[in-house]
Amino acid sequence: MERVVLITGANSGIGLALCERLLTEDSQLRLCLACRNMQRAEAARSALLTSHSNAHVDLLQLDVGSVKSVLSAAQEVKARYNRIDFLYLNAGIMPNPQLDLNAFFKGLFSRNVVRMFATAEGILTQQDRLNSDGLQEVFATNLFGHFLLIRELEPLLSRLVWTSSSNARPSAFSMEDMQHREGRESYSSSKYASDMLSLALNRQKNSQGLFSSVICPGLVMTNLTYGILPSFFWTLIMPVMWLIRIFTNTFTLTPHNGAEALHWLFLQNPESLDPRAKYHSLTSGLGTNYTQPRQMDIDEGTSDVLYSKLLELEKEVRRKRSEENAEEEICAVK
Ligand SMILES: NC(=O)C1=CN([C@@H]2O[C@H](COP(=O)(O)OP(=O)(O)OC[C@H]3O[C@@H](n4cnc5c(N)ncnc54)[C@H](OP(=O)(O)O)[C@@H]3O)[C@@H](O)[C@H]2O)C=CC1
Ligand SMILES: CC(C)CCC[C@@H](C)[C@H]1CC[C@H]2C3=CC[C@H]4[C@H](C)C(=O)CC[C@]4(C)[C@H]3CC[C@]12C
């Protein structure tokens, strides 16, 4: 039977590499690339068809950071497919990243150096902003848009896989400020929230046959990471990055390597997976890829609270959306 796999943020980086890997694994697959920019989506589709000429690759317009776009994309998915075997929640942003060089050089000579390179803890901040729905952009894109998509497609779904990060930290997240309006670590906060949401979804939905997992791709050179430093700087330090890679298995570096855990999960029986584990893509010094589960620092009660708060916010945005629809209809009649 043809399996249907929908991937958000599939037009570049880890998402695109995952598409390549899944088509190599199963040429009968129906892939749906959910992307906000259709030109980039078309380019990705052409690249996939160059290496897999008989592949079934569909495109779906989806801006996961916009409530209106998520709701209309979900309608389109329901019209097109009877079921989605895997939904990869991969799209993500890290806007206006700032590297604290002072903290970085201090970290270089501390006991935490390996941890710093694996998680960027204490050296990376972002500047977030409000989007047109009145939500914080990073929260809306990395977490809430995906949550709304899951809620819309729930009857069609059986497996969810989140591209989280080892940058996810409990101390960056606050339940009183789940959108991270106050702080400067919106990326870390949104990724920790996705870890919690995955656990909560497992607690609420496993009995109905829906399973959720989270992965960390390691440090991968993609548009997201290239945005952190000026491009000449990356060119300069690239040899150093490849050297560090020999000693640090989290430096997966290529999107193909980074997609290892996403691909591995595709091959696993969901009942055999640990809902409290984050599955890490790792690459050995000799270049061998493997997946390793690591326990997440997460409390079940807190993740249930987050789930309830997201349901409340969902109600609110749906109410706002229907008011806007009504206004648009009135304007159209006039
Ligand atoms: N690179 C790394 O080292 C790490 C990455 N990650 C995570 O991996 C995931 C993939 O990122 P990566 O491949 O690195 O980076 P890329 O920037 O290459 O990929 C991000 C993808 O998400 C898409 N996207 C962003 N915003 C939206 C939106 N509003 N609606 C729909 N699609 C959107 C982008 O589309 P567009 O081309 O239109 O911008 C792009 O296809 C992210 O969730 C990231 O947080 C986690 C840990 C480490
Ligand atoms: C000044 C240079 C000599 C070296 C600068 C290196 C930094 C730019 C990078 C060091 C650690 C990197 C990161 C670690 C974790 C990633 C995380 C898992 C993620 O989700 C996104 C990217 C990372 C934050 C990444 C970003 C670059 C570093 C900070």
Image (tube, helix red, strand yellow):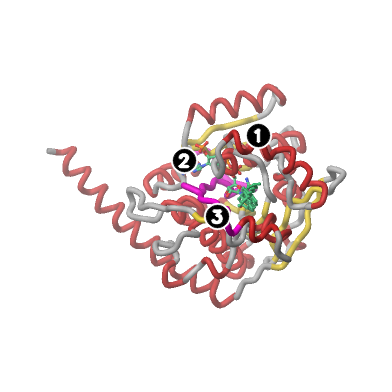
Q: SS class of the residue under badge 3?
A: loop
Looking at the image, which residue is at 76% across and 49% down? 264
Q: Decide: is 63 above or below 296.
A: above
| In the image: residue 291, left or right of residue 217 | right
Quadrant of res 31: top right
Is 211 in front, or is 42?
Answer: 42
- Few, some or many C-alpha atoms within 10 Å of disc 3 (few <14, some 14-19, many ≥20)? few
| In the image: residue 143, left or right of residue 286 | left
Q: Say which mark, if any, is on residue 62.
A: 2
Q: Provide residue 307's location: percent of width, then percent of height.
A: 50, 68
Is 77 in front, or is 69?
Answer: 69
Residue occupied by mark 1: 235
Name the front one of labels 2 and 3: 3
Q: Decide: is 309 above or below 238.
A: below
**Where does the magenta region start and end?**
79-103
Looking at the image, which residue is at 73% across and 66% down? 111
- For the view shown, which residue lies furthest in the bottom direction? 301
